[in-house]
């Protein structure tokens, strides 16, 4: 979200790609992903089948195939004409054919803030057996966050590799794997064909999740502290799938999932996303399903398209979906006007000008009268250089980079006015800050009230701010695809996060920026995701045998509830609340789920046998033989969500759930229900008695509400309490 985060950057890239796509003519070949049914025993047989089927359609296999997926998936990626793709989709043995699409990319005080201090209890030996795999923009191997002081060789289960590549010095006992995936043939002059991180995003996310402890990390003296991941002793494997210009493509993402699963990672962290029409066309959902089959939890970012409703991505129920919340630190700069008036702006400006500079408004210094429309936004080529030289310029925000434009014309710096993006601190490449429209209005009035307006933007300072709240940019529910699964699952810090960065990019990536730093601040759900993947690794180091669903359940039911008062969208913004690493180690009860339950879920959702086969990687599934006649909300999910029918009759939702005892063998839990006004919620039984470890108990929650009882969305909760544990599940009721 922050300009220096790749999201904005990637939005732009996406536009360019779409534009390029429009100019293509139909006969031109494009990349497609072709899914086959069950995987034959041997890799050779799989490859042979692929080639036979393609040959039968008259496709030159040597020329066309770019990836053969044979380890987890039975699929391939190939460059095909529309005709060929159509023909293939009708072939016996092919379950589906989808065009390859591109996704976009969506820091350490934050650990202390959510209650995982450096002194936290650890299982060091187990922790060093945990491998966190990240699909991202690459990594900076020489970063101190990935130094291997004290770590032994990788755990024996590790099958991955790490080679030396261009501009990439290789791995060590901390960074144990690094690969890159790019076979779309587009050259990317701003990137390097190597796992090296030219962007900064992958270095940042990897160090947040599992980076080493680095003392005295800071950004030019700001945000000073100890940088570290959740699991400093865990290992890191980087799978580079995102490229500066071309973005992150489905076929590369699938290849990376397959490699990570085969290599033996424990947790997959993916801060990437894009809208998909359904799970069968979503490479991240498909990759995560195969990971889940092998006991690997995939943690993904919710997206940066909030606060629009239903903007959430990566919402498949086998994915752990993470939104972004704030921590209690902000960055403010004082703006002092020539008349002594002082305002506070938001942002990171590391410059320390001592004297007042002449101040102009972009609207008044257009190159020509016709440029005035653009000059008030300080857009490139709209400003008169002679009137900008040596001045501070006040502009409204339309696109990022006005500081680069102004500096390029010899200007001193910028005051940017915006009503959006004020959650996160932008980093400026010259003295600069962001103000809201009230302050902007006052500054503009001052500029026009004197002959010699002037101002100074002081160096930014850290301030304590109220927290946590959900970032405005964090994508919101309700789930656009499945009305009875609440998403996001959880939130974690994703605003102004300090973590490691690449030396290959300036802080802003803008022309003329000469600021480089080993650490930087980034914002986005991209930064929230590795907090939770790190906590998942932390939980796994205590409970190595837990399933992906169990780890997720432990983290969700122990999350710290957040306030509906400060977060309008309530659960649609924060899910179960803010991640609480300490409590997640000991949840008491877990809601476990296996592969077959997810297949049944897909059947209930109305997916065809072929679509399900595409996702789970098997022959066509016969749903009618799988459904034991349960309600559509039988998936054993740790949250509950009811969408109301638009009638005068009350809607009744029945949620069947099953919890497994992972606390003391003999435990008794009592239920507490919080029902919002106008909603009736009952649970039976109200008491669960366990006499041994891993014993499971079932219960049923019935929710009854009329759509006339309230406006859009209300929520309550079910909490199971024993003397030692609190297991909380939000219950959301909404009108779709
Ligand atoms: C990558 O390595 C090549 C060869 O050593 C060098 O010329 C180039 O400048 C490097 N690129 C970057 C971005 O460091
Ligand atoms: C605008 O920013 C100023 C300075 O930070 C603050 O006092 C004021 O409350 C803000 N106004 C609005 C409408 O957010
Ligand atoms: C699917 O399963 C049902 C119930 O077991 C069975 O009656 C039906 O014949 C099966 N359909 C196919 C195509 O195998
Ligand atoms: C659960 O309910 C029983 C019976 O009402 C009560 O005796 C017990 O103290 C309760 N336990 C907890 C943890 O609240």
Image (spheres, rainbow, N blue to C red):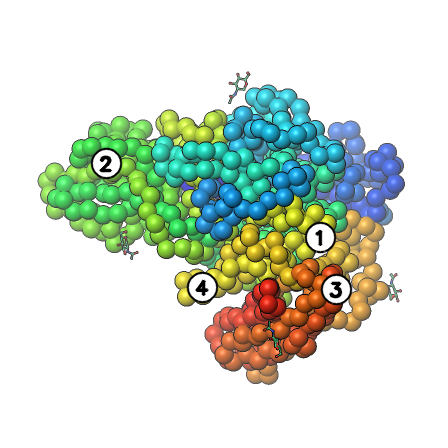
In the picture, measured across the screen, residue 529 lies left or right of residue 655, that is: left
At 19% from the left and 46% from the top, the residue drawn is 342
Work out how far the residue at label 2 is from the one at label 1, CA to CA, in angstroms.
Answer: 57 Å
Q: Tell me: residue 301, above or below residue 700.
A: above
At 54% from the left and 76% from the top, the residue drawn is 675
Q: Identify the secondary structure beneath mark 2.
A: strand
Q: Which mark is residue 392?
A: 2
Closest to the observer, 340 or 534? 534
Quarter of the N terminus within the rendering: top left
Disc 2 crowd rating (10 Å Cα; few below 14, some 14-19, many 20+) is many
Disc 3 crowd rating (10 Å Cα; few below 14, some 14-19, many 20+) is some
Question: Which tag, 4 or 1, sits closer to the chain's start?
Answer: 1
Q: Position of residue 408 (x, y in %)?
A: 31, 28
Q: Identify the secondary structure beneath mark 4.
A: loop
Residue under numbered circle 3: 692
Question: Which tag, 3 or 1, sits closer to the chain's start?
Answer: 1
Q: Position of residue 22 (x, y in %)?
A: 56, 41
Q: Which mark is residue 563?
A: 4
Residue under numbered circle 1: 547
At 29% from the left and 46% from the top, the residue drawn is 345
Q: Quadrant of residue 550?
A: bottom right
Residue mark closest to the camera, 3 vs 1: 3
């Amino acid at each position: 979200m922050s300009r220096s985060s790749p999201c904005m950057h990637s939005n732009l890239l996406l536009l360019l790609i779409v534009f390029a796509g429009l100019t293509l003519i139909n006969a031109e070949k494009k990349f497609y992903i072709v899914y086959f049914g069950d995987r034959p025993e041997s890799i050779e047989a799989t490859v042979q089948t692929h080639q036979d089927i393609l040959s039968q359609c008259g496709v030159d296999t040597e020329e066309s195939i770019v990836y053969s997926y044979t380890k987890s998936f039975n699929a391939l990626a190939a460059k095909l004409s529309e005709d060929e793709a159509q023909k293939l989709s009708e072939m016996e043995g092919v379950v589906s054919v989808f065009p390859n699409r591109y996704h976009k990319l969506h820091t350490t005080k934050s650990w202390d803030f959510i209650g995982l201090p450096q002194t936290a209890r650890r299982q060091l030996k187990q922790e060093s057996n945990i491998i966190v795999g990240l699909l991202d923009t690459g990594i900076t191997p020489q970063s101190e966050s990935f130094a291997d002081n004290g770590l032994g060789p990788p755990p024996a289960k590790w099958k991955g590799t790490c080679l030396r590549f261009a501009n990439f010095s290789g791995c060590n006992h901390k960074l144990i794997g690094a690969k890159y995936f790019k076979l779309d043939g587009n050259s990317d002059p701003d990137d390097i064909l190597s796992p090296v991180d030219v962007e900064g995003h992958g270095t940042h996310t990897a160090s947040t999740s599992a980076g080493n402890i680095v003392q005295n990390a800071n950004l030019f003296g700001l945000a000073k502290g100890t940088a570290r991941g959740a699991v400093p002793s865990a290992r890191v494997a980087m799978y580079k799938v995102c490229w500066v210009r071309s973005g992150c493509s489905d076929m590369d993402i699938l290849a990376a999932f397959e490699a990570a699963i085969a290599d033996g990672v424990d947790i997959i962290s993916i801060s990437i996303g894009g809208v998909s029409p359904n799970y069968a066309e979503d490479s991240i959902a498909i990759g995560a399903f195969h990971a889940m089959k092998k006991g690997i939890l995939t943690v993904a970012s919710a997206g940066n398209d909030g606060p629009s409703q239903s903007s959430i991505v990566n919402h498949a129920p086998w994915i752990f979906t993470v939104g972004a919340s704030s921590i209690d630190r902000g960055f403010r700069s004082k703006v002092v006007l020539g008349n002594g008036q002082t305002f506070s702006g938001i942002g990171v400006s590391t410059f320390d000008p001592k004297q007042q500079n002449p101040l102009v408004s972009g609207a008044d210094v257009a190159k020509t009268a016709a440029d005035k429309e653009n000059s008030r936004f300080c857009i490139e080529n709209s400003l008169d250089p002679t009137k900008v030289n040596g001045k501070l310029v006040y502009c409204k925000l339309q696109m990022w980079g006005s500081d680069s434009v102004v500096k390029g014309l010899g200007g001193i710096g910028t005051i940017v006015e915006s009503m959006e993006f004020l959650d996160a601190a932008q980093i400026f490449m010259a003295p600069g800050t962001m103000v809201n429209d009230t302050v902007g209005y006052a500054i503009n009035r001052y500029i026009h009230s004197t002959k010699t307006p002037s101002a100074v933007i002081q160096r930014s300072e850290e301030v304590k701010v109220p927290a946590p709240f959900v970032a405005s940019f964090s994508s919101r529910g309700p789930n656009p695809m499945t009305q009875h699964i609440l998403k996001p699952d959880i939130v974690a810090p994703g605003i102004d996060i300090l973590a490691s960065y690449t030396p290959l990019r300036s802080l802003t990536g803008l022309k003329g920026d000469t600021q480089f730093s080993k650490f930087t601040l980034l914002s986005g759900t991209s930064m929230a995701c590795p907090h939770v993947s790190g906590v998942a690794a932390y939980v796994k180091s205590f409970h190595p045998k837990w399933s992906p669903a169990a780890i997720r359940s432990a983290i969700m039911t122990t999350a710290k509830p957040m306030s509906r008062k400060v977060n309008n969208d309530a659960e649609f913004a924060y899910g179960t609340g803010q991640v609480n690493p300490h409590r997640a180690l000991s949840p008491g009860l877990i809601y476990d789920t296996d592969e077959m339950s997810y297949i049944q879920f897909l059947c209930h959702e109305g997916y065809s046998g072929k679509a399900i086969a595409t996702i789970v990687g098997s022959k066509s599934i016969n749903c009618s033989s799988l459904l034991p006649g349960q309600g559509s909300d039988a998936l054993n999910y740790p949250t509950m969500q009811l969408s109301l029918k638009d009638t005068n009759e009350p809607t009744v939702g029945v949620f069947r759930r099953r919890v497994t005892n992972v606390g003391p063998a003999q435990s008794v839990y009592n239920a507490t229900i919080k029902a919002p006004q106008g909603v009736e919620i009952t649970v039976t039984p109200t008491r669960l008695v366990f006499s041994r470890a891993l014993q499971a108990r079932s219960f049923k929650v019935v929710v009854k509400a009329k759509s006339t009882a309230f406006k859009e969305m209300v929520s309550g909760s079910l909490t199971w309490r024993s003397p030692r544990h609190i297991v909380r599940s939000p219950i959301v009721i909404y009108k779709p």
